[in-house]
Image (cartoon, rainbow, N blue to C red):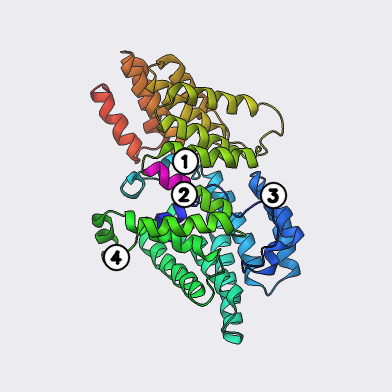
Amino acid sequence: MALPVALLLALATSSSAYTVDLAVHTDPLNYDREVREAYQHFYNLDYDGALTRFEQVRAAHPADPIAAAYVLNCVLFRELYRLDLLDTTFYANDGFLTGKHTVAEDPAVRDQINGLADQAIQLADDELKAHPDDSDALFARGWARSLKATYLAMVERGFGAGLHLALQARSDHEHLLQKDPQYVDAKMVVGVYQYVVGSLPFAFKMLIGFARMGGSKAKGMELLHDSAAHGVITSVESRTCIALFLRREGQYKEAVAIVQSQAKEYPRDFLFALEEANLLKDDGQGRAAIDAYRKLLNEAKTPGHYPNPHLELAYFGLGDTLRGQKMYPEAVRAYQFATQQPTVSPELKRRCLLAAGQVYDLMNLHDKARGEYLAVVAAGPDTSQAEQARKYMRTAFAQ
């Protein structure tokens, strides 16, 4: 999975209603009742509930690399969600590649992720040494490599190291598809790789030392559509990737249709409902987006409706949309509500404070704006948001 491959696999993994398709090949464990139950918790963002069940699966299958990969996947996405890194607004353009993003990495979780990835890869290597034609082990190794690459790119921003692992993951799954074209789940990693590498700016490829990488956006989308339609544990994330890529291409209505279908399929998944509102905003449907954000926030007030909502993401999107509609006082309140959420990450808090300051400046209330800018600097003096805040303290922000 290419460096932003990881970035783009942001919302969920696997597919939902399972009937065994004999024309599609996959690891039999993917159809296990306990595995499916764990994934249902995962879809609802109940990562702790999912992890308990995946750990039970791993305990029952200690030598199976995909069982270790299930746990790795769950721990990884739980951490990305904790860090507010599943906010797709980060990845809708190339700013993520060039901007400064400081993340409060948890060393214990980092070590856990690395340990799980290394274990899954080693178990797969052991199986492949004993049985070189084991397709399931080859898939598991590629998947584990892609997940470790995801952490390196998204959290540590180690794009070079992440890309090296991503190339290995792609190689595993390309090799698997060459010998077994019906192993459809492998098309997701290869498809995302093709699209992302085909989209990377040449200057960025030069910067990280991979200028000769090749990729094809059209080929990537073709593979992803196949994985979305027929994948056993990659259907949902393939659809999520397709929607994000359509968003990058400005094809918002097609992306909205995909996300709306996922939100209908998983009505308790906070991120799918959030993404629908984000896409309406990006499509210029400001009033519809405002309604969608407010509906989401209102539903979240019902205990248990969304098991694990990060309301700061919705408030931030709402603030941006209200700002675009020139509803400035309401925008400031939305940004301020975002900063007050217990789950808000340090970076998103700074982004909200900075945005609130900019809106105050648009209202010609520079004294209030200055207070927000000072709060940005206090929350992270060496960050890109602090640099901008210092600039606007000297010269008021203007649209």
Image quadrant occupied by the C terminus: top left
Along the viewing direction, whichever of 128 and 149 lies nearer the viewer: 128
The answer for how far apart the CA atoms under marks 3 and 1 are is 23 Å
Residue where numbered disc 1 is placed: 255
Along the viewing direction, whichever of 161 and 318 lies nearer the viewer: 318
> In the rendered structure, which amino acid carries the disc numbered 1?
Ala
Query: Could you tell me residue 177's position as x and y percent?
Result: 50, 72
Main SS of residues in magenta: helix
Residue where numbered disc 3 is placed: 40
Which numbered disc, 3 or 1, marks the residue closer to the eye?
A: 1
Q: Secondary structure at mark 2?
A: helix
Q: How many marks?
A: 4
Pointer 2 or 1: first along the chain: 2
- Report the span colored magenta: 243-248
Query: Could you tell me residue 307's position as x and y percent?
Result: 68, 38
The answer for how far apart the CA atoms under marks 2 and 3 are is 22 Å
Residue where numbered disc 4 is placed: 210
